[in-house]
Amino acid sequence: METRDLYQDIILDHGRKPRNFHAMEHPSHFAHGHNPLCGDRITIYLELADGRVKDVSFEGRGCAISTASASLMTEVLKGKTLAEADALFKAFHAEVMGTEIPPVPEPLQDDFERLAPLEGVKAYPARVKCATLAWHAFETALKSGAVGATVKTE
Amino acid sequence: METRDLYQDIILDHGRKPRNFHAMEHPSHFAHGHNPLCGDRITIYLELADGRVKDVSFEGRGCAISTASASLMTEVLKGKTLAEADALFKAFHAEVMGTEIPPVPEPLQDDFERLAPLEGVKAYPARVKCATLAWHAFETALKSGAVGATVKTE
Amino acid sequence: MSVAAKSGARAGFDPRAVKRDFPIFTNNPGVVFLDSAASAQKPASVIDRVSDFYRHDYANVHRGVYRLSVKSSELYENARDRAAKFLNAADPSEIIFVRGATEGINLVVYSWGAANLKAGDEVLITELEHHANIVPWQILRDRIGFTLKVAPIDATGGIDMAVLESLIGPKTKMVAVTQLANATGALVPVEAIIRLAHAKGALALIDGCQAAPRMMVDVQALDCDFYVFSGHKMYGPTGIGVLYGKRALLQEMPPWQGGGDMILNVTFEKTTFQEPPARFEAGTPDISGAIGLATALDYIDALGRDAIAAHEAELTEYGIGVLSRMPGVKLVPAGQRRFGILSFGVDGVHPHDLATILDQHSVAVRAGHHCAQPLMDKLNLAATTRASFGVYNDERDIDSLAAAIKAAQVMFAD
Amino acid sequence: MSVAAKSGARAGFDPRAVKRDFPIFTNNPGVVFLDSAASAQKPASVIDRVSDFYRHDYANVHRGVYRLSVKSSELYENARDRAAKFLNAADPSEIIFVRGATEGINLVVYSWGAANLKAGDEVLITELEHHANIVPWQILRDRIGFTLKVAPIDATGGIDMAVLESLIGPKTKMVAVTQLANATGALVPVEAIIRLAHAKGALALIDGCQAAPRMMVDVQALDCDFYVFSGHKMYGPTGIGVLYGKRALLQEMPPWQGGGDMILNVTFEKTTFQEPPARFEAGTPDISGAIGLATALDYIDALGRDAIAAHEAELTEYGIGVLSRMPGVKLVPAGQRRFGILSFGVDGVHPHDLATILDQHSVAVRAGHHCAQPLMDKLNLAATTRASFGVYNDERDIDSLAAAIKAAQVMFAD
Ligand SMILES: Cc1ncc(COP(=O)(O)O)c(C=O)c1O
Ligand SMILES: Cc1ncc(COP(=O)(O)O)c(C=O)c1O
């Protein structure tokens, strides 16, 4: 596998210019993610309403993979129900772990496609946690609500 | 090396019928020797007078090597000055360790010869401590006097 | 995989063929090795696996991004999976790599013990224990002040189960017991003991040093809380062993040794620790040892664990027969079932002299207290001679032992 | 002994010839291995020594009367002598075999520390320490309540010696410091620190993990009280390392782990312990690890330790030159003298991404906090990329590193 397959232009672009990259003043939910191995620290902010992700943003510093993954995640999560978000996480997690991907419901397939540039990570076991850090933080935020919490991966 | 070189008749004989094998009622010095590895336990009794070993005996149970060595030791030590006893121990110890033997003073050479049947032990590193247990106990007895003490080798 | 191992999987195996898997016997023809209870010899597959690893894939584990380190980490974690499967652990995270059984028990004592035991509590061990399952408890007892109780053996040399049961009470927090006594070969009914312990709310630690290389072990079926074994007695390299612990227990236990790889976050004020097993594996582990152990477990499973157990039982029966027919030879009592290990005395010949003479006949046995001094004291023996079996032994080895004993008897006859 | 090692003893050595002693490079041609600070590769002599031992002479040590066990014990004790000579210890009994530096430091903390430290006492470490020399002290501090002080680095990245001196006072019982910082390559003036410690009646422990493979170490000349290193960083096997301790100190220290081989006498009531080093080596040791380590020390001495130091210094100078000429590349401060290890950052490329891209160019480096999180925090870095040298590296490896860094810079350029 060529490095270029991992560092596709879209990854480099989201790594350099992450979308939805800002704090929220009054998130309904938020959480910190920390990967001590590479020092990546990320905070995910959520605005949930009626069981849907009304808004999502993030802040922090990290490697290109974790930053791009967080950025792409915020793009696909906007407007999703919690069940849809969970289905996307499960499919994405399986994809980067190289395990069997559960069937993705038809309406989510376009969103899942948008995460495809990260697929290359599965050939780099040491980097999988970079790609999943934001998602783990998202999950933790759902559980911890407006008080915040920290999830660590390594 | 053949086992027979280690278990010479004289060793087997002293092992079976140790000489000076009894306790003393009022030793001037005594000490216990213990080799936990093989469970050997020996007690050395001394009667010292005018800087000489007037009498020496031992008791205990042990393997053929340690018993024969104690028996032969009691034979050669009787009547010796402490300096002579020390010279014999040093020479004997070097012999069974396979290190360089210090010169043995002329008058002690016969006694040193009498210990020669134990020389074969040097080919059996695991058994050297059996051969030296009694001597270590003798040394300890000299230091501890009539109160007794225990020396352990392993 | 050797031919011997392959063909043995179903219908038992031929120990003479197995022996050819072990280079030590090619290089020391004629050696009759009867000291596998102290440490087993290594098949070529294990020796070569370790060399190959260093020649092809070596790097430090866990933190490297580069290919060799990723590969090395993968092999190391695969070894953990292998050990989990071998013991039928519910999850690989229940497997902690340690130097051997001794370190495994010390870990439980210093981590679980120091955190959970207090003055007034009781820990129960038995008279059959190896020093490794006595001394660590004593060291902690002397610091904390709990009571260390000892379940006695009965006249047959087995654990007196009635007394053992009576010694487990509401204060008992831990019952730590060997599955197979290394000094005598007594097989201990650990299933029953674990049940008794649990019935009174105590935990159970099983010292599987001698059992794990000889029979099937299923920690979930046993329902033990901790299980330890040493790799070097399992035909694996020195320096590696396994502590199995139930996940829920490990998760509550504080770390013992501190260092790299067992931490999540360090500041000079405060450190947060990893989940098990990483929490308990401080510093660079014995990577090649773990990988070699996995190959050894493969070797054992290829021979077949039931086949090995049958083989050990056959040799034991044969040995009992031969030795008990010899005048002046006395087997040390070993309870209801003697397995894989024969401990005996010969009238008029000290065990230490006997072992030296047997060695001259190329028969390697162990003489001494077998790191079980309290048991020796109880049996009123200073030492015994011990012959123990491995997959490479056959009945001729026992015949050689008997012949050498006879020679010693002749030499020491009055 | 390899040709490279033989010819190198006098006048330096040729790293290209040395490289041929290491099978990993034959089997992975093109790999540029710059991670010896994490763990070094193994020469064929070490790999083969371990196999040969298992093939010819293996048995458990210490208690066997038979020939294989006697031979095995002899080889194991010879390895201890070898390590003593390597460090110029006054006596082999001052050498304790442990799994690695981490276990060595834990042993000092749990044995010497638990017996000698009390609330109010102080232990001094530095900001340059590896987690292995931080976390064990924290664990004991949390139990006992002594104070753990930290000597800071100055703006150059070296230890601020004036502040360090001011932190050693009458309450200081131990100064524990690394000889060469694994995260930055800063060489620490441990001689001066040991003198300062002794002047105030404190002991000194030196973490020699990175120094011992790279330069002459003489524990008597240093006059340190404890010294630790890991075998796997010395071109030896995993699973083995050395704790050196002054005899008089070791003799007063209580045992830590309990088990076989470290006891003189055991009853259920009371146990008496062996003299050092046996007192501190509970259970079956990593016999093959110790023997392999002895061969690795032979290999190092055959190359010549001054020649190795000169080689590491040359590579370091060359690397500093190359990297500091590259735009956007910044070396992490490492005090007065940087040795054997280069830690750096590349503008706009996260160390983790950099390491992945370097790996694609077959350049193996480490990215992360290097088990020195507090130092990273102090330097306000989340992580760095680290290249470290071994006897098999040459200047072309650094050129390959530079070329790969350039490729990453191009990829990440806006
Ligand atoms: C300075 C230093 N100390 C301690 C250690 C820990 O060594 P080990 O993991 O071999 O126990 C290391 C290894 O990274 C080190 O570089
Ligand atoms: C029953 C038992 N427990 C514990 C041990 C200690 O094992 P190790 O020395 O490998 O730590 C042994 C080894 O002799 C043993 O037989």
Image: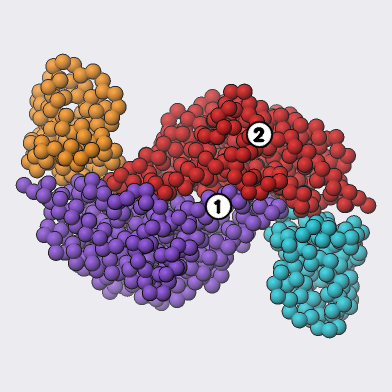
Chain colours: A cyan, B orange, C purple, D red
* Residue identifier under label 1: C52
* Label 2: how many Cα within 10 Å (few below 14, some 14–19, many 20+): many
Position of residue C208 measured from the top left corner of the image (x, y, whole percent):
40, 64
Residue shown at the point (32%, 67%) measured from the top left: C312
Label 1: state its secondary structure: helix
Task: Kindly identify which chain the residue marked by label 2 belongs to.
Answer: D
Placement of A96 over or under B143, stated as above or below: below
Would residue C48 be found to the left or right of residue B139 on screen?
right
Left of A97 or right of it: where is C96?
Answer: left
Q: Is B87 rendered above or below residue B22?
A: above
Chain assignment, label 1: C
Amino acid type at circle 2 is Pro
- Residue C203 in view: no
Q: Indicate the position of residue A65 as horizontal and vertical percent values.
A: 81, 60
Task: Say which mark, if any, is on residue B118.
Answer: none
Residue tagged 2: D15
Instruction: Give the amino acid at mark 1.
Output: Asp
Mark 1: few, some, or many residues within 10 Å (few <14, many ≥20)? some
